[in-house]
Amino acid sequence: DHRESPGKGGKKTPRLRPEGWFALLDALEVLPYRSTKDQMALWDRVWLWEVSAMHHIDEVSSAEHLALSFVEYLEAIARLVALLRSRDRVAKAAAGEAEKWDYGLGAPAAPAIF
């Protein structure tokens, strides 16, 4: 799911909407969200989207800020990889090392990783 938005020189540039991002994560079978017990995965999905999207000066006159540009999409993918690798590192860590990252959430919170 993407939409086109005017770019420089009047060319249309593809932008990824949130439903497209969530569909991609579902297709990759990463951060599954199927029930309320998967609240952390849902939070991570949204957080990755939010921190990867650049802030726009004018978020009132257009909906462009609601979709990721290609560069923002690449940032979201990079953050997803870093998040998954960090969580994997914690899962494989010795008890003493893993305890340093434990915030009582069952997994390190995404903002704490970055």
Image (cartoon, rainbow, N blue to C red):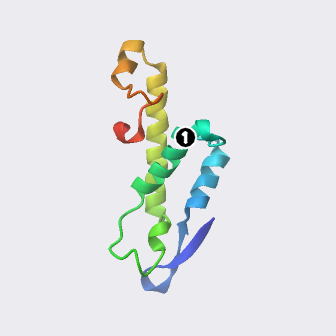
Residue 19 picture location, percent across and down: 60, 60
Q: Quadrant of the N terminus?
A: bottom right
Residue 42 picture location, percent across and down: 55, 45
Residue at image position (50%, 82%) is: 11
Residue at image position (36%, 77%) is: 58
The residue sitting at the bottom extreme is 10
Within the image, what quadrant is residue 33 found in? top right
Within the image, what quadrant is residue 82 found in? top left
Mark 1 highlights which residue? 39
Residue at image position (48%, 58%) is: 73
Vertical side of 60 occupied by 73: above or below: above
Q: Amino acid at mark 1?
A: Gln
Horizontal side of 37 relative to 60 (left or right) equals right
Horizontal side of 55 relative to 46 (left or right) equals left
Residue 40 picture location, percent across and down: 51, 39
Residue 3 picture location, percent across and down: 58, 72
56, 42: nearer the viewer: 42
Vertical side of 8 occupied by 66: above or below: above
Residue at image position (45%, 49%) is: 47
Within the image, what quadrant is residue 100 found in? top left
65, 104: nearer the viewer: 104
Total numbered labels: 1
